[in-house]
Structure formats: structure tokens, C-alpha cells
Image (spheres, rainbow, N blue to C red):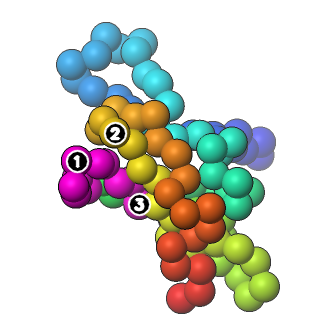
Amino acid sequence: MKVKMIKYLSLYSHLLAINDVYALLQQKDIPWLRMALWAPAMIEANGKYYLFFGGNDVHEGEVGGIGVAVADRPEGPYRDALGHPLINEI
């Protein structure tokens, strides 16, 4: 079975036309991200929007865990807030 790796988080909205999909956060914008990007959760604090996400598979000796990206607007664009995972080991 062939698996396609998606390297971005997408925003879908019932307010957008069915074909309007754009990337909130792309793999290229997170230097430590190599594999997976999943389970996003967004919060607003102090006038900024923070997108927390799972990144990479977490195995001993590998970088991965919970990342955080930041933007000025909820629709982005988001950029890596720290340059490394917020939490690297669980």
C-alpha cells in the first residue's frame, strides 16, 4: 500500500468554498520536524495565537514530542516558536 505523507496542517471551513484549503503550518517552517505532524490545538494569549501539535514519533535519542508555533492571526501564517519541541521526552 502506498501512503502519501502530508507535510502541512490544513484549514477547512464551511465559510470557505469547497476547494479553498490552505496550509496553517508547513513542515518546512519547523526545523526539527522530520516525519509526522498531528493533533493540533490552538489557543489565544496576549494577542498571539499558539498552535500546539504532536511532531515526529518520539523514540529514545530522537527529537520529537509536543511543538508550538505562533502567529499574529488565527489563520496564520504560523512559525516555530522555540526552534525545538516544547516537550521532547514523555
Tell me if label 2 and label 1 are in contact, CB under 8 Å: yes
> Please, what secondary structure does the residue beneath circle 3 have?
strand
Queried whether the magenta region covers residue 50, the answer comes back as: yes
> Which residue shows up at 31% across the image and 11% down it?
17
The amino acid type of the residue labelled 3 equals Phe
57 w.r.t. 89: above or below:
above
Q: What stretch is highlighted in magenta?
A: 43-54
Can the viewer see residue 15 in this picture? Answer: yes
The amino acid type of the residue labelled 1 equals Gly
Q: Is the magenta stretch mostly helix, strand or loop?
A: strand
Upstream in the sequence, badge 2 or badge 1?
1
Upstream in the sequence, badge 2 or badge 3?
3
Mark 2 or 3: the one toward you: 2
Q: Name the residue under label 1.
A: 47
**Residue 72 marker:** 2
**Residue 52 marker:** 3
Mark 3 or 1: the one toward you: 1
Upstream in the sequence, badge 3 or badge 1?
1
| 47 sits to left or right of 11 | left
Determine the CA span between mark 2 and mark 3. 15 Å
Quarter holding the C terminus? bottom right
> Which residue shows up at 30% across the image and 36% down it?
73
Q: Where is residue 27 in the image (x, y as percent from the top left)?
A: 65, 45
**Residue 61 marker:** none
Q: Position of residue 30 (x, y in %)?
A: 63, 51
> Please, what secondary structure does the residue beneath circle 1 have?
loop
Please state which of residues 80 and 22 is positioned toward the viewer in this rendering.
80
Classify residue 16 by image quadrant. top left
Please state which of residues 77 and 17 is positioned toward the viewer in this rendering.
77
